[in-house]
Amino acid sequence: MGLVKALWRHPIKAHGRESVGHVVLTEGQTFPWDRRYAVTHEAAKTDGGEWASCANFSRAAKAPALMAITAKVDEATGKITLSHPDLWDVTLDPATQSDKLIQWVRPLMPADRAASTKLVPAGAAGMTDSAFPSISIHTTASHRAVEGRLGRAISPERWRGNIWLDGFAPWEEFDWIGKTLRIGTAELEVRERITRCLATTANPETGHRDTDTLGVLNDSFEHQNFGVYAVVTKSGDIALGDTAEVL
């Protein structure tokens, strides 16, 4: 049995993260306010409204500076405030102010990559990296295992997880695939491992690539996975400090 260590949401895919203390999960839906919007680029083949693969969107794997964006959601108005160490803070309504976001983020985008074009809404499944409405679950033990191989501490925010659990063994989460977790009063079925990309090599404080996370995973653990995707099978509340157990 473990405990909930942290809860995170990413309201605009690859454009900011926000920690929360409590969340209500709904059966068959993503983490509330997580990947509710995404940013298309010049080569995108989608206008939003339904799930599409990550290749259609501006993301930190191609533009590492995006990793340093933090977000704050005003749930009453739907407005999102974004911050970055190299830019001014911006507050926008993602439903009506797409151009404002594109102008703000332009200095962070590499000149040799497809330029961001539009802020688009996700479909009912959310704009996660899986084709189903997933919630990502990570363990502090696996993070510490990576740090041990690196020989130094790194921010767990590199992994962009939704739910962080303490009290389990390193990589134990891979054994949960096909099983159900009860976290707080919610239940989630674990579906698959999360294969990692270059986004995790960028420092979430600076937006600069400074750590070969993929090399450590491949060379030290013989895989390129960190965390697991799960789906909500029973609605319920989750808060920091709640218990988590495998059923």
Image (tube, grey):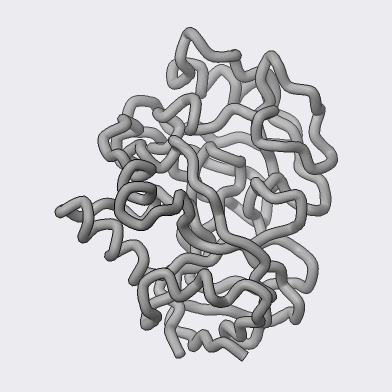
Residue 68, percent from left and from top = 38, 37
> Which residue is at a point 45% across and 49% down the rendered structure image?
224
Pick the residue in front: 45 or 82: 45
Q: Is residue 148 left or right of residue 237?
A: left
Q: With respect to residue 78, does 30 lie above or below?
A: below
Q: Residue furthest top?
A: 111
Image quarter in which the N terminus is found: bottom left
Q: Quadrant of residue 24?
A: bottom right
Q: How many marks?
A: 0
> Which residue is at a point 24% across and 57% down the rendered structure image?
147
> Which residue is at a point 20% across and 55% down the rendered structure image?
153
Residue 119, percent from left and from top = 69, 29
Residue 86, percent from left and from top = 33, 26
Pick the residue in front: 195 or 3: 195
Q: Is residue 92 left or right of residue 60?
A: right
> Which residue is at a point 57% across and 87% down the rendered structure image?
246
Q: Is residue 229 left or right of residue 205?
A: right
Q: Residue furthest left?
A: 151
Residue 159, percent from left and from top = 44, 52
Q: With respect to residue 166, does 88 lie above or below?
A: above
Image quarter in which the C terminus is found: bottom right
Q: With respect to residue 180, does 11 lie above or below?
A: above
